[in-house]
Amino acid sequence: MSTPKTLFQKIADREIPAEFVYEDEICFVIRDINPQAPTHLLVIPKRRIPRVGESTPEDAATLGHLLVTAGKIARELQLTEGFRLVINNGPHGGETVPHLHVHLLGGRPLAWPPG
Ligand code: 5GP
């Protein structure tokens, strides 16, 4: 039996609607449904990697692609004052969707340390 699709696989397959900002063969970028900043995007690999803590050397190119894509989108959106990339991992990290994704937050000053 095949593994049930994650929320993000359903979004990638257009089974659940989302606002797409970018898509290529490796990843896609959508607007977060509950934005925490004026710009809050999710950069998501099409092939599911559950979380950074379970990534393997085979995932290196995909993980690199997510960061390069985040940088490209930030430039396109002219986030010239800066932005933040976040990957939550596990319960203490605040992960709620078990399909790795990079949050791209910008458009306002972001506090440090995070909560
Ligand atoms: P996590 O907490 O796993 O790091 O991030 C999951 C993110 O997915 C959250 O920021 C949450 O707001 C977002 N999210 C949850 N459900 C949906 C949805 O159906 N559509 C979109 N666009 N974002 C979602």
Image: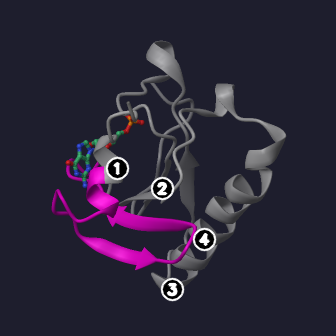
Mark 4 and mark 2 residues within 8 Å of each other at the beta carbon:
no
- The residue labelled by disc 1 is 8
Asked which secondary structure carries label 2, the reply is: strand
Q: Nearer the viewer, mark 4 or mark 2?
A: 2
- The residue labelled by disc 2 is 44
Q: Residues within 10 Å of mark 1 (few under 14, many from 20)?
A: many
From the top left corner, tell me how far across and down residue 32 is, in percent. 29, 54
Q: Amino acid at mark 1?
A: Phe
What is the residue that sits farthest to the front in this orientation? Answer: 1
The stretch in magenta equals 10-36
What residue is at 34 percent from the left and 62 percent from the top? 12
Q: Of residues 34 and 80, which is closer to you in this image?
A: 34
Depicted 77 relative to depicted 95: above or below? below
Q: Nearer the viewer, mark 1 or mark 3?
A: 1
Q: Amino acid at mark 4?
A: Thr
Q: Is residue 43 left or right of residue 71?
A: left
- The residue labelled by disc 3 is 76
Q: Quadrant of ligand 1?
A: top left
From the top left corner, tell me how far across and down residue 108 is, in percent. 40, 59
Q: Amino acid at mark 3?
A: Glu
Q: Is residue 11 left or right of residue 2?
A: left
Mark 2 and mark 3 residues within 8 Å of each other at the beta carbon:
no
Separation of disc 1 and disc 3 at Cα? 23 Å
Q: Nearer the viewer, mark 2 or mark 3?
A: 2
Separation of disc 4 and disc 2 at Cα? 10 Å
Dot 3 or dot 4: first in sequence order is: 4
Q: Is 11 one of the magenta-colored residues?
A: yes
Asked which secondary structure carries label 3, the reply is: helix
Q: Residues within 10 Å of mark 2 (few under 14, many from 20)?
A: many
Depicted 76 relative to depicted 89: above or below? below
From the top left corner, tell me how far across and down residue 38 is, in percent. 30, 62
Dot 1 or dot 3: first in sequence order is: 1
